[in-house]
Structures are given as structure tokens and as C-alpha cells.
Image: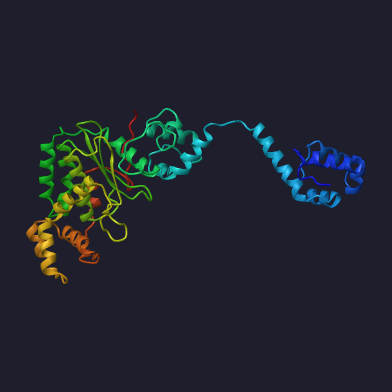
Amino acid sequence: MSTKNEQYKTPGQLVSNLLKERGWTQKTLSVIMGVDSNAVSLIINAKRQVDASMAVVLEEVFNVPAKRFLDLQKSYDLAKARIEAIPDPDRKTRAHLYGELPVNDMIKRGWVNAKNVRDTENVEASLKHFFGVNRLEDIETLPHAAKRTEISVDATPTQLAWLYRVKSIASNMVVGKYSKTAVEKAIREIKRLLLSPDELRNVPRILADAGIRFVIVESLPSSKIDGVCFWLDEYSPVIGMTLRFDRIDNFCFVLRHELEHVKNRDGLETVLLDVDIFDESVGKFNDTIASQEKRANEAAADFCVPSNMMDKFIRVKAPLFSERDFLALSKITKVHPGLVAGQLQHKTKRFHLFRKYLVPIRKIVTASALTDGWGNIAPIYES
């Protein structure tokens, strides 16, 4: 007999039909199988599951593939589970949040107030507070969330989490009055600090006096963020940086890049998230960028070393660059040799040149800046 086209919902229904086809009773089957007659009754009435070993026995008795019985059992169990399951509309939401957001790292950093990821009640309460929403499903990282921050790149949930942290810290800062004139003055003041790494500890104060909220937040794993520029309102610019490359050339370049955005009031409508400005392996600039990013890069490069002087130096001295000539250019341009090294590497694509001058800067700057990361946790304010 063929059973393929019959519509059975349980293996018991198939067994019952097979008995009718053969004119057997349940007792007859129990004798053939060597089991108690009650066992056959339980199978037929779907009160006992047909496991693999039982399916093999039924295959031998009825010459029906064991897989047929197991497939029916699996389908029946799944249908039963769907009926008995308690619907949880938040399950998909949790799957996305816990699967996409770096919750464990956020707990370690003190952004989420919970013992660990299994402390779901506190995790979820903290996530709502962190993203400023009343319901989990309104968290912006979810595909269906109504609220969307306009960002210059297709930001990942990890990058969004970092951005929200910067915004939270910046929102509670007190700074001076912003004006374009104040920003231009700040750029000139910072330019005068470029000879000495230690002098760069004054950057946070200079920016605060110019009405710019400056925040350093250590990047989350794999986020590749260098900096960000956005505005809390028309008169409240924010610069956030990660210092993920602890080098003087990177710090000065990214800082001036973001200051160019502030100077031109970029980011009023769209958050300018600068991701991977430098290639991680060699420190080169990312050239696949929008016009406002290109303009910011050009201003930053010229800030570190005047481009006309850098280009002339390369044209005259290439292909051999002596340390004496290199240091002379640093002295003439009144900047630390690390800034000259950074620009020289970028323009020549020879990333080994004068690497010893790319001195670390993180400890100097974070000593005076509002910082979250590297063991420091910025205050979490109640909204």
C-alpha cells in the first residue's frame, strides 16, 4: 500500500490505517511487535511519541520507511508546541538586541547597569534608558524602530551605541558660548600647540571656551570610528573622538577634521560619523568620501603641515629623505616631527618613514578631557 499521498497528522493515524488495511487488531500488532497492547493504543492515540527505534520496528512490520513515521511525529510535535506555546512579542526584539548590540561590552564599560547578559531585567531597563525610549521595540538599532538618526554612513548597531554614549555625555556638559568666530580662534590657538605633545592637554579647555563640547569615548570592538561631529541644537556643536590610534598625527588630523565640520556648520541635519579615516594596518586616509569629508581632510592635512611646503619637500628631496632634512621641515613649520611623519607617509605611501616620531598622545589628552574608556567611566545621568 502507498501512504505517500494520504493526509495523516500523527504516526498513530498512519498505524491505525495500516491495521485496517491488513485487518489486524491492536492486540495482533502488539504480539507481532513484542510489546504490551497498551503501548500500541498509546501510539495510535498520539499519547506516546514514536522515536527512532520504534520507527524502525514499524518499518519492519509494515514495510513503510521509518522516516515516514518520524516525519509525522516531528510535524505533530511542532504543531502541538505552536498551540501550547505562550506568545512573546518581545522575543524577536530581544533576539535582535542581544544578537546585534555589544551588550556584554556595554556592561563591562558601565553603560548598561546589569551583572551580566543573563540579568535580562536590568539589561533591558538599562538599554531603554541608554537609548532614551520607553519600550524595547523603540530602540533605534531595531529595523522597525520609528525614530531614525540621520547619519552620514550606514551605521552599525555598535557604532550607534557609541554615538548615543557620546551624545549622553555631551548633553550634560557646560561650555562657553558658541560662535563661528570663537571656533576660528580655537583653531588658531590649537595650531600654536603643535610643537609639543604636552601642550595638547589644553585642547579640551580651548574647545570648551569656544562653545564646543569635546568628548573622548573609547571605541567598542570592531566599530572603526575615528570621530564624529553633530549638534545638540543650532548653537551646540559636539566633537566626539575615540583615539583608537594612539599617535600624535592621528589625533591632530582627526581633531582638525572635525573642527572643519564645526566651522562650516556641517552636521546640523546629519550626524557626520567618521569611520575608518585611517586604514588600520598602515594609517592611510580613506579617499572614497563625500565632498564635505574631502574638504575636512584637506583642511586637516594643511593644519598638520602646510600642503604647499609638504609637496615641495617631497618634490625636492624624493626619493631619499634624510632625518636632518625631515627635522628641519618640522622646525620651519613649527609642528612636532610626528605630524610631518604622518603627512609624509600618507603622501608617499611609504609608511615606514620616521615612525619613531609618531608619539603616543592618549594619556596626555585624556588627562584633561571628559573621557569614557580605558578604565574611566563617565557619569551616567538620570533623564
Picture residue at 20% right of the left edge, 64% below the top: 348
Q: x and y percent of residue 132 in the render?
A: 37, 31
* Front residue of this view, candidates 35 and 378: 35
In this view of the protein, can residue 116 be seen by the observer?
Answer: no
Left or right: residue 271 compared with residue 158 = left
Total marks in image: 0
* Front residue of this view, candidates 329 and 195: 329
Q: x and y percent of residue 370 in the render?
A: 25, 41
Left or right: residue 380 compared with residue 176 = right
Left or right: residue 120 compared with residue 74 = left
Picture residue at 75% right of the left edge, 47% below the top: 68
Q: x and y percent of residue 141 in the render?
A: 41, 38
* Front residue of this view, candidates 161 and 301: 301
Vertical placement of residue 287 versus 21, above or below: below
Where on the picture, by quarter, is residue 171? top left
Quadrant for the C terminus, please: top left
Left or right: residue 72 compared with residue 178 = right
